[in-house]
Amino acid sequence: MRTARWYLIRILLLAAIGISYFLCIKSYREIEQLPDTVTISCSGGFQKDGNGDETWGNSTWEYALWEELEGEVVSNPNLNRQYKVSVTAVRGSCRVLLPQAYWMGDSDGEGCFLDRTAALGVFGSTDVVGKQLLYEGRQLTVRGVTDDRGGIMLIRPKPGEALKNIILSVPDGASQEVLGTEFMAIQGIQGTVTDNRPFTGIVRLLVLGFPFTILLFYLCRLNKVIRGMTATPVLRMLATVMTVCLALFTTGVFLTCLHIPRDYVPTKWSDFSFYTGRAEYILGQWKQYFQIPKSKLEIPYVFCSLKSILYGLLSQVFFVLSTGLDRAFLYE
């Protein structure tokens, strides 16, 4: 017999489901607001001058060349202090790589940007704009302090220095793979294209998987009710059609509210080749979507992704506990 305590627990679990999934969606939205970029790793390095603007058709897309060195020693001669940071040399548009450093000049070979961890390690404070430090014999002036990235320093490379990575800004709805491949073809280089949003596959799976879990559960329950009805076959067929229409409508609402790249959503009849050619493309990129981050510059994506994954898993767990999926077909 279901007691008041049972109903209270179920209400609390339903509230936990709503809160968890809301936080999952909120974290997913934070990911979507971060810059969408793609990286090309060149085996032999790549060298190009300019401000990091390239024109394709009627659009100008920003890019930058960069390379990250771990465990580099930075010195503060005034305090006789040394600190190890991750040094990132960038040529081109800094805004693509680190939005807070967007105004750093292309020829600013004497400036640098630190994150909060590096600023505290080198100077013992975050109020360090205008102060100087030493790195490999170069005297650099701090131009600004960014949010925490685990200890990084952004600098301009030496003239003529070749850098191994290229980062491109991705327009809304564009394909990272297509953009990276087109850039390599135009520049005549060879490299590996990687998405800069680690764990995006897991996050999208949880964000979209939760409403489908609810739909599947309640469709199964509705089918049970239909099978138990003593109505005519016509009414049963009508109820089934209405159930399918409701499922399609709900799916469309979720796909509209959530920002899903165009690669994943057919928009016209011909796009249903998604189930053949595009499915092969996504399977080929499966490893990339679930890649482990390799750069400290990806920390904001990692933080938002892990939050979304945690809240998404909690919403799934609370849903299973509240509905009792293992007993639903026995007691209902």
Image: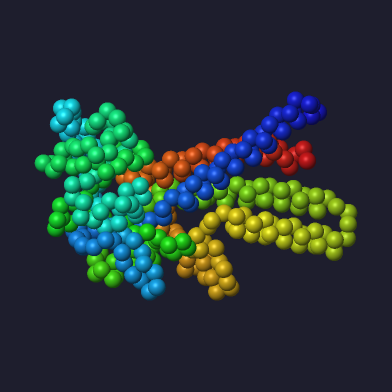
Quadrant where the N terminus sits is top right
Q: Quadrant of residue 182?
A: bottom left
Question: Which percent across, then down, holds residue 198?
Answer: 40, 48
93 lies above or below 217: below
Whole-percent x, y for residue 235 in the image: 85, 61
How far from the left and from the top, in percent, is residue 220? 71, 50
Whether residue 152 sits left or right of residue 265 in the image: it is left
Task: Describe residue 178's horizontal placement relative to residue 206 as left or right.
Answer: left
Please state which of residues 204 and 139 is positioned toward the viewer in this rendering: 139
What's the residue at 29%, 70% (across, down)?
185
Of residue 280 and residue 111, the one placed in the foreground of this image is 111
Q: Quadrant of residue 78?
A: top left
Q: Position of residue 8 (x, y in %)?
A: 73, 28
Q: How is the image coloured?
A: rainbow
Tell me: 87 left or right of 277: left
Q: Does residue 166 show up? A: no
Q: Is residue 74 visible?
A: yes
